[in-house]
Amino acid sequence: MAPPRGKVLPGTLDLIVLKTLDVLGPLHGYGIAVRIQQVSEDLLKLNQGTLYPALLRLEQRGWISSKFGVSENNRKAKFYSLTRAGRKQLAAEAASWERMSALMTRLLDGVERA
Amino acid sequence: MSWLRILVARLRGFFHAQRSDEELEGELQAHLEALTQKNIARSMSPEEARYAARREFGGLEQIKEKYRDQRGLPFLETLLQDVRYGLRLLGKNPGFTSVAVLTLALGIGANTAIFSVVKAVLLRPLPFKDPARLVRVNESVANGGRSPVAYPNYVDWRAQNDVFEEIAAYGDCEMILSGTDKAERVYCEQATDTYFPLLGVPAEIGRTFTPEENATPMKYAVALIGHGLWQRCFASDPAITGKTVRLNDFDYTIVGVLPKGFLGYSDSAEVWIPMMMRDAAWPQTAQFDYLHNRDIHFHKVLARLKPDVTLAAAQAEMNTIAARLAKAYPKKNRERGVQVISATGDYVKSFRAPLLVLFGAVCFVLLIACANVANLVLTRSAVRDRELAIRLALGAGRNRLLRQFLTESLLLTAAGAAAGIALAYWSLGFLVSVLPVSFPSFTRVRLDSGVLVFTCFLAAATAVLLTLFPVLSSAHTNVNESLKEAAKSTAGLRGRRMGRALVVSEVALTLALMIGAGLLLKSLSHLLADNPGFRPDHLVTLRFYVPDRKYEGDGRNRFGPNLAERIAKYPGVESAASTFIDPFVWGGFQRWFAVEGHGPISNAESDSVYYQEIGPNYFRTMGIPVLEGRDFSMRDSLQASRVVMVSESFARRYWPGQDPVGKRVKYGAADSPEPWMEVIGVGGNIKYNSLRQDPEAEPVLYGPLLQSEVIINMSLIVRTRTSSEAMLGPLREEMQRIDPAIPVYNVATFSQRMHEDSAETRSYGALLGLFAALALVLAAVGIYGVMSYSVTQRIHEMGIRLTFGARPGDLHRLVIGEGVRLALLGVAAGALASFLVTRAMTSLLYEVKPFEPALFLGLAAVLTGVVVLACYLPARRATRVDPMVALRYE
């Protein structure tokens, strides 16, 4: 059975965005969307537009900041970058995600063995 | 503090929405552009590329919407939107808006004003320590009435009870303060030492009374004065203690000043002397031996319940003590019980009934007002059915619509409440000046925060109710049907049913109010039209004090009658007489007596009636007919044999069918040592206490002032030849010329006195009448609204009826018939409601029964007439319908 094209789990979009900015440094919205698509190999079905309210939310919380800059095709664009608070948040969320994921793995493994 | 950061960010977003919108637009367009370019690079046609980009990106407008919700304060934004929309809508319907706001303002304003008074008078605690535990202890007599307390009984109560933390007795009376610039009359309380600690009032300067001062009669001539008197007569002297105050020609040493605003439990005292000094203040009454005589019931007793003792427990304990005392003093305390009542209840009892009736009346007005506004909103919601349906069809959420309706209603009620509060603020002063009752001195009537909260709560409740109607009637409306406009049948039917219920309740409430007002006004006309038994025109009364110590023998007795003789010669005076009553203020006291040859009149072996002492010429001056025998003359003196006169009702009660002249009565029981007194004449019945008095039920025994044992204060009654009001000044001056040391007070014409006496009924009647008129107008407007709505709803039906040959008269009958049916239902419900209302009013009524068939039928007819009129206009419109137009409408 082909793996279903998953929806973004609630709360994970934040983590994905933060991680993307952590790895690639300052990016504009399109860049983030492209990166997410590359990494997920199109497994994640994401309306790219939904990225923007999420970016606003992260910015309101102080985890990312935005600044106008010039894009690769010489256009004025808004660049988002990770703040210190964002880095902390990312670490915390990643850790909690790993714990949860390990738990789920153990659980599902157990189910299969039984 | 992350929520704070978010709030700040959102606030910034809220205020910079426009710039941020432009930025977002740019950002999103750039993103779409990039996607499109990417797609073109994948060799799509530009057209295809753009579509694919759109698909990938998602709904542009939804994203923007979400972004905006995330950015600012969507709750506030929606609210502002709704408020703007609501205001625009209200502005577009000025008729609807002004009627609704005005109606609400009247209801809420009247309610706030009356409730402010109710709260200030009835709900405010007494200004004494822990008023909840303060009680009054009265003696109770066999017939269930209550009486003041004999001092020895108080002493026994105090010694024997263990339910009271503290118990105190006091008596109150008028005294003449002299030795200052000008002699004046002040109110005095003679109090036990426990009185001030009981009320929790310490002296402002000096001290209150000590237990020693309450132990020995006539030993400690000390006095306390009130703050006002201290300022007025002693120039706020800080070293006042040790100075002297002269009261009834006796000197007292001032030991303290009581705090500002304290006027004693009687709420009028300015001077206090120890209970033990009574005989110094009233040497004339020393013979009665107040402090040891169980037959003199004169004192008022206050007590404070112990913290864990209930009123019922205290009553039970006092019953036991009363039974013990009745056994110990079988003659004196026979059938004397004790009554313990809450002091607060005692204080407000005379205001309670009328204020609650007024409060009930304004509640009715408010209910009618709310019904009207509900009606208006309901009517309008029918008009807005299509708007609602269209908005629902275009995807508006029901909650969103509910919210918008709520905002609109809140706007309307907020405006109504604001106008109402303004109205209340303005009318409160007017109300207090119109209310004739003299409220306790510590009552401060003003709009207070509690009342405002209450009003706002009312307004909010109204808003919610108003919202429920249109949304309820739209909630089940099928969008499609509403759009097709055939849905009127269901929504309309529900609306009409609601409308009918409103009409019935408005008629009922209005009728109850009108009957209440009608009964009061009828009472008033009885009060004013009833013959008082004397000629009240050209009659003046002046009260004065007869100093005790100046006169010897019967000089004191002759003082009043002599003064009357002198005044009678004054130009413009027809005749003058003296009496010790103060007409319509104080009507004499109850005196126990026995009738010769008559069996014991009551269980207590003697009866009591009002006793009045009068000088010669009293009947002629008052214009009271002497029906039998003769009037008192100057010869009926202390040296002559003892005589009395009686009133017509007295003669009828004790000697029915016989000639009362020559019969004999005596004070006290038949075996008392008092001398027998011969009845020399019978005077006609009069009202002297109040216009509500029934002279037949209150016989009077008249004694001659010239044979009195006690002469204290009396009044001069003067019949003038010219305007009595113009004579007030000259008469007062003439009295001062005769003896400047005699203070003259309580000067008034009889018309003024009787006007004041009826003032209460007059203004309660006027206020209730005002509310009833208000209710009638509101109800008429409301019923007109309902009927118009109903006719609008049935316009096709009317058209069809006309097409099938109905005549205009038939349609009139149809519409008016419905109105009349509703009115009659309302009248029936109103009869029930008025039964409840008028039962609460009995104490305000005079010579009318709570159920007056003629009045009831008359008012019901008036009300039905108004309903018919309110139906007639819409009915006429119904007949003017062009059948073609009505049918095409369908």
Image (tube, coloured by chain):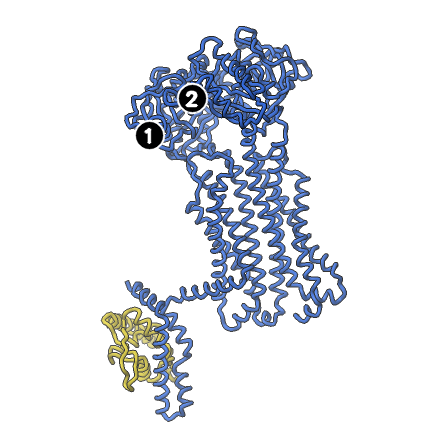
Question: Across the whole image, how many numbered discs are drawn on residues?
Answer: 2
Q: Check disc 1 and give the amino acid type.
A: Pro
Q: Check disc 2 and give the amino acid type.
A: Met
Q: Image check: B826 left or right of B267? A: right
Q: Which residue is denoted by mark 2 in the rendering?
A: B175
Residue B669 drawn above or below residue B273:
above
Residue B10 drawn above or below residue B412:
below
- Front-most of A1 and B670? B670
Chain B colour in the picture: blue
Any part of residue B289 in sight:
no
Chain A colour in the picture: yellow
Q: Image check: B614 left or right of B51? A: right
Given the current orientation, which residue lies at the most extreme bottom position? B43
Indicate the position of residue B874 as horizontal and vertical percent values.
66, 59
Q: Chain of mark 2?
A: B
Secondary structure category for the residue under label 1: loop
Q: Image check: A36 left or right of B719? A: left
Indicate the position of residue B494 as horizontal and vertical percent values.
61, 61
Q: Are marks 2 and 1 on the same chain?
A: yes
- The image quadrant that residue B229 belongs to is top left
Q: Which residue is denoted by mark 1 in the rendering?
A: B202
Alpha carbon separation for disc pair 2 and 1: 24 Å
Indicate the position of residue B107 as horizontal and vertical percent values.
53, 49
Q: Chain of mark 1?
A: B
Q: Image check: B183 left or right of A70? A: right
Tags 2 and 1 in contact by the CB under 8 Å rule?
Answer: no
- The image quadrant that residue B496 belongs to is bottom right
Residue A72 has which mark?
A: none
Q: Earlier in the sequence, mark 2 or mark 1?
A: 2
Secondary structure category for the residue under label 2: strand
Any part of residue B379 in sight:
yes
